[in-house]
């Protein structure tokens, strides 16, 4: 049976860019990362690319920012696997080790002439506008735009990956978490001067303006998923009608008293069957199509409701 699977990042236009040999060299660095980190890096780059496009940033900056995003976690090459891939919560000591991936990644890029232009990705993607981030506890004015964009993309994909979404149903809960991260926090763990803390007390960790563009991307993707689901429902409807007709011939075949008539209706059944379907398994396949149809119809309603909920969210 044909399957309908939604790819969260299928609408990215990243592939429209013709990456030259130098850029391919930068992306090949990802091959040394573990599978999870490499996939996360690719996802963050795709989201970053789309954020730049939705923000109407220049093509050159979009490509630059996207490469920075690809390389943002490159420092995790040197984080011990037992810490990087730990299932349970990290200890304070382990968390401090994890945090070093930012400066390790920065140094890796800075020491490689081909990667040096993109060292902002590793260095800034965990900095927070309110000064609570790392490695340097910078405030908004000192965090470049590429770092702020990558941070939003990074946090979004981290939550999506952790929750193993296969569809945008329930994605509102993820956006609510990001809204909280965009709101000002009373507690800021930073040793900066009191006047700086006061000046940046109005900031949260992530840029709410960039988050608004992420909302637009999620809405567009959810509507795209609705469109895909409608197409699949149409496909299912056609298959169900076809196999129902085959079942009618099958029932007539069973009640015939002569072999000639049985063969006549049997051939009618077989003419309606598609690749992989047989007279023995088509009834089971018909039930699978019916169940898939019911599930997708229910998902359509949930997806429409998800779009409504996202549009109601306020940052």
Image: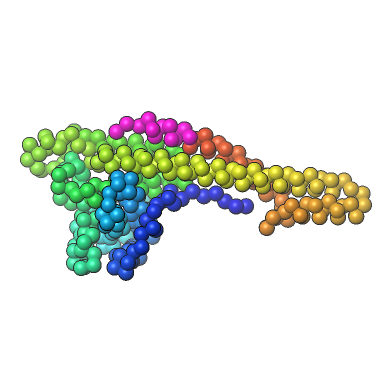
Residue 69, percent across and down? 29, 55
Whether residue 132 can be seen here: no
Identified at 18% across, 34% down, the residue is: 202
Residue 88, percent across and down? 34, 49
Q: What is the tally of numbered marks visible in this picture? A: 0
- 81 is higher (above) or lower (below) than 186: below
3 lies left or right of 275: left
Chief secondary structure of the magenta portion: helix
Identified at 18% across, 48% down, the residue is: 143
Q: Is residue 9 magenta?
A: no
| Image quadrant assignment for residue 296 | top right
- 285 is higher (above) or lower (below) than 219: below
Foreground: 47 or 159? 47
33 lies left or right of 97: right
Quarter of the rendering occupied by the C terminus: top left
Identified at 28% across, 42% down, the residue is: 210
170 lies left or right of 191: right
Residue 234, percent across and down? 61, 43
Whether residue 160 can be seen here: yes
Q: Magenta stretch?
A: 304-315
| Image quadrant assignment for residue 263 | bottom right
Foreground: 252 or 77? 252
Q: How is the image coloured?
A: rainbow
Q: Is residue 310 magenta?
A: yes
Foreground: 59 or 169? 59
Identified at 21% across, 61% down, the residue is: 117
Determine the residue located farthest toward the right in the rendered image: 258
Residue 230, percent across and down? 55, 42
99 lies left or right of 21: left
């Amino acid at each position: 049976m044909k399957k309908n699977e939604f790819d969260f990042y299928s609408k990215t236009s990243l592939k429209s860019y013709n990456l030259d040999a130098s850029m391919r060299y930068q992306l090949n660095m990802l091959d040394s990362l573990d599978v999870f980190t490499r996939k996360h890096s690719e996802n963050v780059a795709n989201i970053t690319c789309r954020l730049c496009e939705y923000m109407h940033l220049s093509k050159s900056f979009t490509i630059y920012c996207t490469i920075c995003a690809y390389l943002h976690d490159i420092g995790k090459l040197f984080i011990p696997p037992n810490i990087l891939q730990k299932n349970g919560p990290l200890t304070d000591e382990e968390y401090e080790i994890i945090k070093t991936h930012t400066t390790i990644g920065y140094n890796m890029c800075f020491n490689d002439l081909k990667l040096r232009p993109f060292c902002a990705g590793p260095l800034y993607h965990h900095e927070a506008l309110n000064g609570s981030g790392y490695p340097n506890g910078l405030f908004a004015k000192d965090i470049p735009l590429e770092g702020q964009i990558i941070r939003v993309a990074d946090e979004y994909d981290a939550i999506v990956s952790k929750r193993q979404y296969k569809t945008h149903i329930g994605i509102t809960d993820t956006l609510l978490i990001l809204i909280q991260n965009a709101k000002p926090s009373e507690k800021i763990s930073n040793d900066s001067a009191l006047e700086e803390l006061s000046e940046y007390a109005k900031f949260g960790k992530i840029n709410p303006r960039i988050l608004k563009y992420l909302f637009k991307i999620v809405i567009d993707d959810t509507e795209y998923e609705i469109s895909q689901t409608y197409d699949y429902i149409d496909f299912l409807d056609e298959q169900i009608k076809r196999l129902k007709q085959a079942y009618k011939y099958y029932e007539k075949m069973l009640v015939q008293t002569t072999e000639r008539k049985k063969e006549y209706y049997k051939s009618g059944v077989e003419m309606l069957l598609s690749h992989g379907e047989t007279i023995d398994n088509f009834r089971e396949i018909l039930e699978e199509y019916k169940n898939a149809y019911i599930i997708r119809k229910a998902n359509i309603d949930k997806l429409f409701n998800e779009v409504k909920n996202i549009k109601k969210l306020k940052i």
